[in-house]
């Protein structure tokens, strides 16, 4: 059993690597979201000719400014979708680690682990059940958070509705701030719970 626990610990080290990749993508997504929401937030101002003053004497200036802003917004949305794809790759990697972990105890090339062996704990070492449950919980957290991020990005992209040549803002600054805060908080990945999983898996190293 000790050898199998070590194999699981190796997987959790790879999990840490994936979570570092996740943090990098999180920083990128927050930056992209702030840039996009700042454009969305000022679309209503851009659409009002009363805000152009003397520039109204320039034929089509309002349309040019609005179109450039929408082009920039579209580019940001495409970048955000690329970032979401990276999040998804991490989720799939975590899923594979859990699936391989299940295969490790279900037989494979060796004899399947019994229920008693699954729960066996030697000293401060984690049980195999601890390891498998930890992989599952971390995957589920990140899967749920990925789905939330996808929903938030989708919500932001729908904040402008195209009707003929007009663009109508349908979200307030308060709504944008609330969506941004959801991304910042990452509510589906409680840091304390994640840390407690790693504490159990690497208890012997901590000691």
Image (cartoon, grey):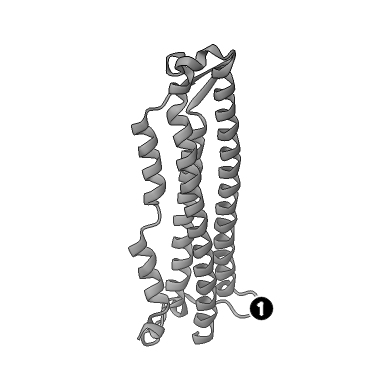
Is 30 or 118 nearer to us in this picture?
30
- Mark 1 highlights which residue? 109
Write the residue at 47% across / 28% down.
159
Give the quadrant of the C terminus. Answer: bottom left
Which corner quadrant of the image does residue 122 belong to? bottom left
The answer to which of 193 and 27 lies nearer the viewer is 27
Q: Nearer the viewer, residue 182 or 4?
A: 182
Residue 77 in the image, given as x and y percentages of width and height: 57, 38
Farthest-out residue, right: 109
Give the x, y percent position of residue 93: 59, 61
Under tag 1, what secondary structure?
Answer: loop
Rendering coords of residue 50 (x, y %)? 43, 14
Residue 192 drawn above or below residue 188: below
Q: Closest to the observer: 128 or 62?
A: 62
**Residue 10 at x, y = what percent?**
54, 77
At a point 40% along the width and 56% down the height, the residue shown is 189
Q: How many dots with numbers?
A: 1
Residue 43 visible, this angle? yes
Q: Residues within 10 Å of mark 1 (few under 14, many from 20)?
A: few
153 over 203 or under it: above or below: above
Residue 155 visible from this viewpoint: no
């Amino acid at each position: 059993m000790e050898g199998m626990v070590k194999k699981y610990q190796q997987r959790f080290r790879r999990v840490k690597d994936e979570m570092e990749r996740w943090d990098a993508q999180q920083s990128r997504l927050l930056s992209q979201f702030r840039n996009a929401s700042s454009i969305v937030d000022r679309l209503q101002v851009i659409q009002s000719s009363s805000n152009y003053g003397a520039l109204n004497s320039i034929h089509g200036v309002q349309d040019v400014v609005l179109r450039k802003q929408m082009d920039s917004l579209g580019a940001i949305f495409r970048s955000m979708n690329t970032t979401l794809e990276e999040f998804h790759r991490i989720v799939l990697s975590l899923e594979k680690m859990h699936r391989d972990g299940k295969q490790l105890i279900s037989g494979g090339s060796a004899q399947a682990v019994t229920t008693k062996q699954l729960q066996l704990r030697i000293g401060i070492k984690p049980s195999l059940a601890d390891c498998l449950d930890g992989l599952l919980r971390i995957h589920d957290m990140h899967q749920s958070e990925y789905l939330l991020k996808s929903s938030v990005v989708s919500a932001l992209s729908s904040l402008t509705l195209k009707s003929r040549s007009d663009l109508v803002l349908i979200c307030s600054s308060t709504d944008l701030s609330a969506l941004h805060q959801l991304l910042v908080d990452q509510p589906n990945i409680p840091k304390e719970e994640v840390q407690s999983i790693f504490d159990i898996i690497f208890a012997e190293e901590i000691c």
